[in-house]
Amino acid sequence: MQQGTRWAGVAAVLAMGLVGCGDSKPCDSVSGACTAITVGMPEAEMVKAFVSAPANSTIAFAEGNFVFTNSLNLASAAGITVRGAGMDKTTIDFTYQSAGADGIVQNNPASGGGAVTFQDFTVKNTYGNGVKVVGAVGVTIRRVKALWTGAVRGPYGLYPVSCKNVLIEDSVVDGARDAGFYVGQSDTIIIRNNLSQNNVAGIEIENSFNADVSGNTVTHNTGGILVFDLPGLQQLGGHNVRVFNNTVRDNNTQNFGIGGTVSLVPAGLGVLVMANQNVEVFGNTISGNNSAGSAIVSYYVTQLPITDPGYTPIPARVYVHDNTYSGNGTSPDPNKDLGLLLLSGLHAFPGGVVSDLVYDGIIPPGATNAQVGICVQHNGSGGMANLHFDQLPANGFNLAATMTFDPAPYDCSLPALPAVTLPGA
Amino acid sequence: MRLLRRSSVLSLLALAACGGNGSPPPPPPPCSPQAPTSATPPGTLAEWCQVSLQNGDVALKSGVVPYDLTTPLFSDDTLKRRTIWLPPGTSATYATDDVFSFPDGTVFTKSFGFRDDLRKQNPVVTWIETRVEWKVAGQWYALSYTWNVGGTQAVANPAGDVRDISFIDETGASVTAHYLVPSQSQCAQCHQQNAYVTLGTRARYLNKTYPYPSGTENQLTHLTALGWLTGAPADPANAPRLPVASDPTSGTVEERARAYLDANCGFCHNPQGNARTTGLVLWASETDPFHYGVCKTPVAAGGGSGGLQYDVVPGEPDQSIIPYRMNSNVPAVAMPQIGRSVVDHAGLQLVRDWISGLIGSCP
């Protein structure tokens, strides 16, 4: 009997915690359950809001700087929203982090996984990833900035993985050591109208299905937009990715990645498609990327082993059309193998500048390009080069001896890929 | 209204904070474990009536059963005491590889304490926390209760915290751990797989003897005899058993290293775990060398790779990412990601020895 009353008392305390104490203003415009996080709250109180957030509730930060020393693990309940007062008004600051790897992380179970929303705040100086979500269905990240200002750099800024229905818009990532925006092993994705700068990779779509990457400004990264499929993962066969109407400019930052596939990317690569099927790259403005404006390559260029029998290392059905290129490929980055290769053959490119599109030319034995479907049309005068990677080793990696510039085999079109639609987006 | 509510909370907190120090604690009221019926936990560990601290060690209430594991998770060199309790008339169902299936009302506790000096026969143990995991209506819940200085009371700590604790290790060196009491949602980082699961309750971890007060007996046999476990092989020799990583007589270096990685990494690095997205599977049952790291490039490790190319390079522990991360205490480099702030030198040496003995090379 006594135990019963005690339990009820604790329940009341926990319920109080949800309502929050102090300034409730951040919750004013929120419908439904909401916990306000206000300046001066102890970390433990703020963490409690994340720990105990019930389904479909909101955690609302006031304007201000909020310091955390430990990862913020968000409860796995469905439909939680974490919001601030604005991307430049609320900062969730991990500069003094001493435990946990990531900034804000939610492990949302795949079975019955629910939605999660992050909006209107900056997450700063995490050791690991800025915002990481695993296994959610319905991820919305809107007007969120992931920012690094010091020596510590996390790998990914905004990082949904193994998710379905992902929308990232009007957000900023600055300073990530791997990819600023990274969506991996996911399905049905829209990444639009974001700014990605000073990262190793600007935007990376990896082992994912059905993605639209549009209207983004991608600048001062090592590589701009990467569409990758990698072996050895649970979800293989990345396909149906549209990259359109983006500005991919001056991505010439020296690669400061440590390990991983992205650390192989030479500085100055605008758009890179590796080992994906069904990719459409169109309407982009690609300028001032010093290694190459764009590239289509197989996984073989990484020179890494492939032991995965279910993996397709060769890209197919990639349609690059109606892009505007200018000032790319003038000085490839000699610090990475691909850049060094381009630099060594620079004199052999027409005009002594790397063609706007370079293609490794590797196709399955016995196949023709008509079957593989690499199509390149209406991109202006910068041309394309087939590097003929398959012939390079026999030629002592002398690019001048292997590459060809005839556009005719690739003068083809592919049906437009379907637009990605998300409920409510 | 608000003021009134806040003051009542304050007084409750004050009560919680004032237990213990000063006057001797009142004797605990007699109690017996009760099956939890709510997701909302009591505010103090005592209300669970599962364990208490007596004479510097964890004491079990009547009916609560202790257990341990073949190869445990390393947790900053802490001493751990684990207990299980099932409601009367209920039982768990055995599984060969998977976690056992437990009935509603099941309660686990795990207490973590630091020894002052690992070289001592009878060290002084400072108990930090007791974690409770319980099942209600098919759902598991977990919460840490942290002990006060006198060890007289443990209070719910849903937000967790980090504590700096110094001790003397086996070599006589002074070590300071930044010990993490996990927040309730950090529990989920390891326990939340495709569903929230218990971790240590698999046959391969439990299949060992334990010195019960009634005599030493195999844990699977003991739980079966209690009526708490059904479906286990009559002879434990027919159940899986993980080698004891620290005991060279229990398996080859490879078997023990894989056992160590199973217990210390496999809770995330498995096809359902939080690290399923990496493609690195560290369960001992994984048979594809690529998937347990041999010549496997990392996917999302970032700086955690230390610039090394592969998780495991045969014959080259210094070129392998797994020992690199085991040897780091830096957040986002250190593995496991949470729960370890000091290096497990013995575990690291075992994994290095295994890699040194592997034949082959990577491209």
Image (cartoon, coloured by chain):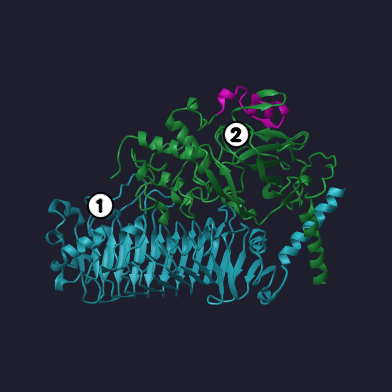
Within-10-Å neighbours for mark 1: few <14, some 14–19, many 20+:
some
Q: Is residue B85 visible?
A: no
Q: Where is residue A249 drawn, in percent x and y?
A: 33, 75
Q: Which chain is green?
A: B
Q: Is residue A199 visible?
A: yes
Q: Where is residue B360 drawn, in percent x and y?
A: 30, 37
Q: Nearer the viewer, residue A92 or B270?
A: A92
Q: Which residue is mark 2?
A: B120
Q: Residue furthest right?
A: A1
* Disc on res. B184: none
Mark 1 is on which residue type? Pro
Q: Which residue is mark 1?
A: A364
Residue B208 horizontal side relative to residue A416, left or right: right
Structural distance between the alpha carbons of marks 2 and 1: 66 Å
Q: Nearer the viewer, residue A310 or B309?
A: B309
Q: Which residues are magenta?
A: B217-239
Q: Nearer the viewer, residue A243 or B206?
A: B206
Within-10-Å neighbours for mark 2: few <14, some 14–19, many 20+:
few
Under circle 1, the secondary element is loop
- Does B30 appear above or below A153? above
Mark 2 is on which residue type? Lys
Q: Is the C-beta separation of discs 2 and 1 under 8 Å?
A: no
Q: Nearer the viewer, mark 2 or mark 1?
A: 2
Q: Where is residue A164 drawn, in percent x and y?
A: 51, 60
Q: Specify whether residue B225 is painted magenta.
A: yes
Q: Which chain is cyan?
A: A
Under circle 2, the secondary element is loop
